[in-house]
Image (cartoon, rainbow, N blue to C red):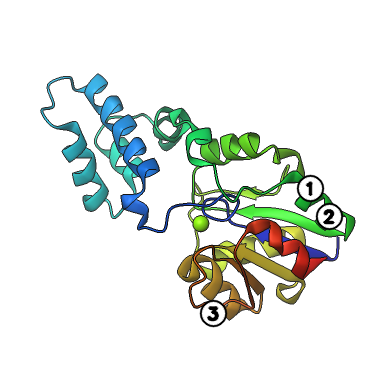
């Protein structure tokens, strides 16, 4: 492998609504599942959704940490399994889906493929299964349980270093300017932004649909 493509998952391998993460229906589903977990441990809680939101704020978005610290789960993995793991990925992966044929073309062109996502592994596993593309990424998936998460430079460097690839032989494909594109640009990684709403982009290239990356890379 001489060239590497690193892909984000959510909003990249499938399209998400043009809204803040915390406004997305998918996130509300996670809040509901989290409230269910809470209610089972402490049935007396009056407004578990409000409590989940309190934990979200108090732990700076690290709900899994809050759930462990406050005794609702034994481990972060248990939290992810009982919440993210129980959300129906199919419901949210409707438009702009990455097609296996796109990855076949990239593999033909000798690109290595990896994933760098801040979402938990159980979610990524389900997403890849839903899209029918898991086999392209085996052993090359970096997920959000790590202490190094996007946008830290170290989160990108761990992928490059473990696969022995120079930054200028890598391409980062993502939808988020702040966590995918800007930090990659700063490291000298070429960037393609999946940009369905055609906003102004700071990436090397911008595409409306993930499958259009073939036109740039092949
Ligand atoms: Mg994304």
Which disc number belongs to residue 101?
1
Determine if the C-beta at disc 2 is less than 8 A from ligand 1: no
Q: Residue shown at 49%/78% (left/top)?
A: 200
The answer to whether any part of residue 70 appears in the image is yes
Residue ID for mark 2? 105
Mark 3, other Cα within 10 Å: few <14 / some 14–19 / many ≥20: some
Q: In this view, does 38 lie to the left or right of 137?
A: left
Q: Residue shown at 77%/62% (left/top)?
A: 214
Label 3 sits on a secondary structure element that is loop
Label 2 sits on a secondary structure element that is helix
Q: From the top left corner, tell me how far across and down residue 58 is, in percent.
A: 21, 51
Tell me where residue 211 sits by quadrant: bottom right
Q: From the top left corner, tell me how far across and down residue 59 is, in percent.
A: 27, 51
Label 1 sits on a secondary structure element that is helix
**Labels 1 and 3: the sequence-earlier one:** 1
Which disc number belongs to residue 42?
none
Q: From the top left corner, tell me how far across and down residue 26 is, in percent.
A: 39, 41
For the N terminus, give its image quadrant.
Answer: bottom right
Mark 2, other Cα within 10 Å: few <14 / some 14–19 / many ≥20: some
Which disc number belongs to residue 202?
3
Q: Image height check: is 114 above or below 160?
A: above
* Nearer to us: label 1 or label 3: 1
Q: In this view, does 88 lie to the left or right of 165?
A: left
Tell me whether the residue at label 2 lies in contact with that at label 1, contact meaning CB atoms closer than 8 angstroms. yes
Q: From the top left corner, tell me how far across and down residue 87 is, in percent.
A: 44, 32
């Amino acid at each position: 492998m001489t060239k590497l493509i690193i892909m984000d998952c959510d909003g990249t391998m499938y399209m998400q609504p043009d809204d803040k993460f915390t406004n997305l229906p998918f996130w509300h589903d996670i809040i509901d599942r989290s409230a269910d977990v809470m209610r089972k441990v402490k049935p007396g809680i009056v407004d578990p959704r409000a409590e989940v939101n309190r934990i979200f704020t108090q732990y700076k978005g690290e709900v899994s940490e809050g759930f462990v610290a406050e005794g609702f789960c034994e481990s972060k993995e248990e939290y992810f399994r009982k919440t993210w793991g129980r959300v129906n990925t199919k419901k949210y992966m409707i438009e702009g889906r990455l097609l296996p044929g796109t990855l076949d073309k990239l593999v033909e062109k000798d690109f290595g493929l990896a994933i760098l996502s801040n979402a938990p592994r159980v979610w990524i596993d389900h997403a890849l299964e839903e899209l029918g593309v898991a086999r392209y990424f085996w052993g090359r998936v970096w997920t959000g349980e790590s202490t190094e998460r996007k946008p830290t430079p170290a989160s990108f460097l761990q992928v490059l270093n473990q696969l022995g690839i120079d930054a200028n032989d890598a391409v980062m494909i993502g939808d988020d300017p702040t966590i995918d594109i800007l930090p990659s640009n700063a490291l000298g990684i070429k960037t393609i932004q999946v940009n369905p709403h055609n906003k102004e982009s700071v990436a090397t290239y911008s595409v409306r649909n993930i499958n259009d990356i073939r036109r740039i890379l092949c």
